[in-house]
Amino acid sequence: MLKTYIIAVLLGLLFSLGFAPNDLWFISIFSLTFLHYLIQKANKKELFWIGYSFGFGLWSIGISWLYVSIYFYGNLGFILSLSLTIIFIGILSLYSGVSLLLYHYLRSNSKISILFSLPIAWIVIEFLRSILFTGFPWLISGTMLADTLIDGWTPIIGAQGNTFLLLLLSSFIFLFVKEIKRFKAALLPGILIFILLVSSFSLKKIEWTEFDGSLKASIIQTNLELKEKWSSLGVVKTKSMMERAINNGEEGEIIVFPETALIFSQNEIKDWLTYIDHKAEQKNITLITGIIEREGKFKVRNRILGLGLANTYYDKVKLVPFGEFIPFEGITGNLFDIFGLQLTNTLPGEHTKPINAGNIRISASICYEIAFPELIRETASESNLIVTISNDTWFGSSYGPIQHLEIAQNRALEHKKTLLRSTNSGISAFISKNGEIIESQGYFKEKLLEKEINLYKGKTFYAKYGNLPLFIIISVIFLFIVIKKRKLDNLGR
C-alpha cells in the first residue's frame, strides 16, 4: 500500500495547484478523478491513510506560507519553524482522512453512490473544518473556481457549494471513463458533465444585483515593514500618507487604509484624529482605516475606524487562532510561553455591523474574517460595497497573500458587489462584482490605487439563503444513499 499512499500524496500536491497563484483548477478536477480509482477497493483503514496522504500533499503546498510567518517573524529558528509547520500540516490532513472514512460508510456499488458519496463526505468534513475550534476555512476547495469559466453557480451556492460542484464533476468524469466502453452506461455521466458545465457558464449572464451609483475610490498600500510599522517613524509616515490622501482626495471619495495602519488608540491620538475627521468631512470624504484600540494594560481590539462621512467603527469578531488569541489558553498557553511567541491577547468584537457613509453602505471585515462567508453575509446582503483590510506582511511574498486575495474574490462573486481590499504590503486590489481583479498592487510596494467604482444593491440567491438550500439537498441525497446502501447490504445477506 506504500505505493498507493505515495500516489495519494502526489494527487494532493496536484490538487493544490487549483488554488492561487497557479489557478490550474482543471488539474484539481483530474486529481480528484484519479483519487476515485485509488479508493474504489480500499478498506476502511486504507481509506483513512489514503485521505491523510492526499491531505498531506495538499497542505504541504497549501499552507507553506505558515513556515515563512513562523521562521521570519516568529524568530524560532529553522528546525522549530519547520517542525511546527509539519505538525500543523499533519493536523489538517486528519480532515481528509476523516472525509474518506465517511465515504466508506456511504459507498456501495450503486451509481448514485459512485456519483455522490465522495462529494457529500468531502463537503461535510470541509464544512466542519470551517467551524470547529473557531474554524479554519482556508483553501475551501470551491474557492479555486472564482473568476473561471464555471463560476456561474457561486451567487447561488457560494464557494462551499462550489466544493460540491467540483467533487461532483470529478465523479461524473470518473463514471464516464469507467463506463466508456458501454455507450448507454457512459451516456448519463456524459450528459451530466455537459449540463453542469453549460449551466454554470450560462448562469454567469444573470444580473443578480443592480447599479446603485458610482464614486472614486482610493486604496492605500503603505508598505511598512513590521519593525518600521510599529515605530515612531512608521507612525509619522502613516499620518503623512493619510493627510496627503485627504488633501488630494475628491469630493465624495472613499479612501481605504490597511489593517492596524494606526498603532495608537483613538484616545492616544485624539486631537490628530479630530483634525483628520474634520478635514475629511469638509470634502465629503469617507476614510476607512485600521486602528488598534486598547482596553486596559494588556487587552486590545482590532478595529476599523470610519472618519469623515463614516463616523463609526467596527471591531474584528473572528480572531486568528495563535495569532490574536490562544485557543484553550489554560492548556496551551504555557506551551507557547516556552516557545517565546508572546501572543497578543486580542478581544473580539461583540457583533457585526455595517459602516454607513452617505449613500455608501459598507460590509467591512478585517484580515482572516473574509474567509468566513456567513460572517460576511450578515452585512453584505444589505450593503452596496464590500471592504476588507489586512496586514499580510507576516506571509512575506509566499502563497499566503494571493490565496487570501482569492478568498476575497469569492466574497465579491457570492454577493455580486464590488470589493476593495487594502493591505499593508500586498496584495491590495479592486475586485469587480464578478470576482475579477480589476487592478492590484504586488508585494512590498508603496502604492496608491485609484479607480472609479460602481456600487450595487440587491441580494443574490446565496445572500438570501446562504448554505441552507445546499445542505437540504445534500441531506436528502445522504439519506437516499444510506437507505439504498442498507437495501443492497440486506440483499447481499
Image (cartoon, rainbow, N blue to C red):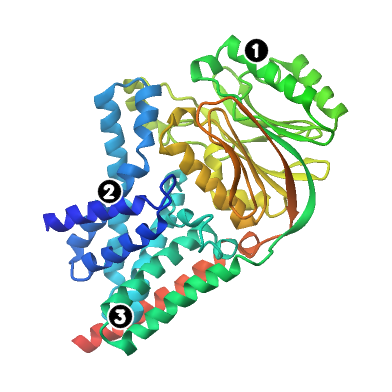
Dot 1 or dot 3: first in sequence order is 1
Q: Residues under labels 2 and 1: Cα distance?
A: 45 Å
Q: Mark 1 belongs to which amino acid? A: Val
- Image coordinates for residue 233, horizontal then vertical, percent: 59, 10
Q: Secondary structure at mark 1?
A: helix
Q: Categorize mark 1 by other alpha carbons within 10 Å: few (<14), some (14-19), many (20+).
A: few
Residue linked to disc 3: 485
Taking the spot 54% from the left edge, 73% from the top edge, the residue there is: 199
Q: Secondary structure at mark 2?
A: helix
Q: Categorize mark 2 by other alpha carbons within 10 Å: few (<14), some (14-19), many (20+).
A: many
Query: Would you say residue 108 is visible in this rendering?
Result: no
**Residue 57 shows which numbered tag?**
2
Dot 3 or dot 2: first in sequence order is 2
Q: Residues under labels 1 and 3: Cα distance?
A: 68 Å
Residue linked to disc 1: 236
Q: Residues under labels 3 and 2: Cα distance?
A: 31 Å
What is the residue that sits farthest to the right in this orientation? 282
Q: Is 267 in front, or is 142?
A: 142
- Image coordinates for residue 222, horizontal then vertical, percent: 60, 24
Residue 428 in which image quadrant: top right
- Image coordinates for residue 29, horizontal then vertical, percent: 37, 62
Q: Mark 2 belongs to which amino acid? A: Gly
Q: Are marks 2 and 1 in contact (CB under 8 Å)?
A: no
Q: Categorize mark 3 by other alpha carbons within 10 Å: few (<14), some (14-19), many (20+).
A: some
The quadrant of the rendering that contains the N terminus is bottom left
- Image coordinates for residue 482, horizontal then vertical, percent: 35, 77
Indicate left or right for 359 with 426 as reference.
right
Q: Mark 3 belongs to which amino acid? A: Lys
